[in-house]
């Protein structure tokens, strides 16, 4: 159904002090898989509500039809005498400002706990509480080793991004509740479900849900059928003198659809000081799975009626047949952007 009512509220950073901002217009809202997403807001510079939006000091709740849809932080503002526009990021972005400053020796630990411990550690630091609770989710059953050195000053947000990028990793999100709570959730093996009832179709004869194609491409520039992933070094003390070895993960697709088809296309990447070979191998395999063949991606403008019916991480059938522009198969929703100007959704899709 189309959105009938949009409400904007200002809160303090601890989620208290809720106050409605009726003078503020929501121009767009974006949700991204495993990322913070954001929103664009605008207001007359002379309106009293403009004075209440303080960059990085307050947060903004965005409600559609009496349900909270996003919780964002105003980061920047600009404009003219007619209108000023605020760029906002989702509350997960607070973790971009948190850096690990102590050694964490984690060996053979449930991988969800690795992520949860990072989120909790960041919020126990002085002035670091972002009031993001931990959800009540079950474990993944996958155990990993991921010792981290504090003197490398790794970024908490960047560390979290490693988990969706490894074989048998997981997705995560900040789930929002109408009472104002925010909860960090982990999803294994992946966030989202298959929703065949929302098949997206677009061709010269007709269309279903799809209003237009705003970007479409097939990318073969960054292909890799053979991936090396370098980590840290370990010391063999059994030799004299001691010998240092660099730990290197590797994966090559030697099936008919891999190197035999395209020729060996090698990529060498780095995972910093990680010394767990299993982690490095899993990261290599996941990278090859994503880049082992030309990848088709697109942004499809679809009906606003799908808001709330599909979510980031969901998979849907796609049938686009418009000359050379073709997308056929099951695609995953990587991002959703609601646009006020056109009252539609822009879905960022990639093959599932």
Image (cartoon, rainbow, N blue to C red):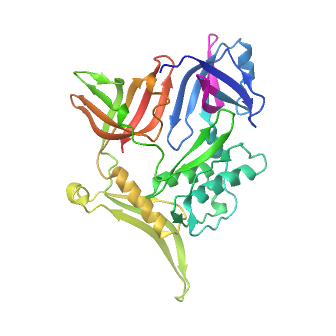
Q: Is residue 238 visible?
A: yes
In this rendering, position of residue 228 left or right of residue 99: left
* Residue sitting nearer the eye, 351 or 182: 182
Q: Is residue 78 magenta?
A: yes
Q: Is residue 268 magenta?
A: no
In magenta, the rendered stretch is: 62-86
* Residue sitting nearer the eye, 291 or 130: 130
**Total marks in image:** 0
- Residue in view at x 37 percent, y 50 percent: 290
* Residue sitting nearer the eye, 179 or 282: 179
| Image coords of residue 255 (percent x, y) | 24, 61
Image height check: is 137 above or below 349?
below
In this rendering, position of residue 23 left or right of residue 140: right
Q: Quadrant of residue 210?
A: top left
Q: Is residue 298 visible?
A: no
| Image coords of residue 53 (percent x, y) | 71, 24
Image height check: is 58 above or below 137?
above
Image height check: is 74 above or below 133?
above
| Image coords of residue 284 (percent x, y) | 41, 60
- Residue in view at x 46 percent, y 31 percent: 309
- Residue in view at x 54 percent, y 87 percent: 241
| Image coords of residue 246 (percent x, y) | 48, 71
Q: Main structural element of the magenta stretch: helix, strand or loop? A: strand
* Residue sitting nearer the eye, 209 or 136: 136
Instruction: Give the quadrant of the C terminus.
Output: top left
In this rendering, position of residue 288 left or right of residue 104: left
- Residue in view at x 47 percent, y 18 percent: 343
Q: Quadrant of residue 13?
A: top right
Q: Quadrant of residue 254?
A: bottom left
């Amino acid at each position: 159904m189309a959105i009938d009512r949009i409400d904007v509220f200002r809160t303090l950073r601890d989620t208290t002090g809720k106050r409605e901002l009726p003078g503020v217009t929501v121009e767009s809202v974006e949700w991204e898989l495993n990322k913070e997403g954001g929103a664009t807001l605008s207001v007359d510079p002379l309106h009293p509500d403009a004075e209440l939006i303080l960059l990085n000091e307050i947060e903004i709740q965005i409600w559609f039809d009496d349900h909270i849809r996003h919780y964002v932080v105003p980061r920047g503002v600009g404009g003219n005498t007619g209108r000023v526009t605020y760029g906002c990021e989702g509350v997960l972005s607070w973790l971009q400002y948190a850096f690990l400053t102590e050694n964490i020796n984690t060996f053979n630990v449930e991988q969800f706990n690795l992520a949860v411990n990072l989120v909790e550690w960041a919020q126990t630091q002085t002035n670091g509480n972002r009031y993001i609770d931990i959800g009540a989710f079950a474990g993944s059953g996958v155990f990993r080793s991921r010792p981290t050195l504090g003197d490398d000053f790794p970024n908490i947000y960047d560390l979290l991004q490693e988990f969706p990028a490894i074989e048998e990793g997981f997705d995560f999100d900040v789930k929002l509740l109408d009472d104002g709570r925010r909860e960090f959730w982990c999803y294994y093996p992946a966030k989202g479900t298959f929703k065949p009832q929302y098949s997206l179709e677009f061709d010269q004869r007709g269309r279903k849900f799809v209003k237009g194609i705003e970007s479409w491409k097939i990318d073969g520039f960054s292909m890799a059928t053979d991936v090396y992933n370098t980590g840290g070094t370990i010391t063999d003390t059994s030799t004299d003198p001691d010998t240092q070895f660099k730990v290197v993960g590797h994966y090559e697709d030697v099936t008919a659809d891999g190197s035999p088809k395209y020729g060996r296309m090698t990529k060498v990447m780095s995972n910093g000081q990680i010394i767990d070979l299993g982690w490095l191998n899993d990261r290599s395999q996941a990278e090859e799975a994503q880049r082992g063949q030309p990848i088709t991606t697109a942004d499809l403008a679809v009906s606003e009626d799908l808001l709330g019916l599909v979510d980031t991480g969901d998979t849907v059938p796609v049938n686009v047949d418009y000359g050379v522009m073709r997308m056929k198969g099951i695609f995953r929703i990587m991002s959703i952007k609601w646009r006020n100007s056109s009252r539609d959704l822009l879905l960022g899709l990639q093959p599932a």
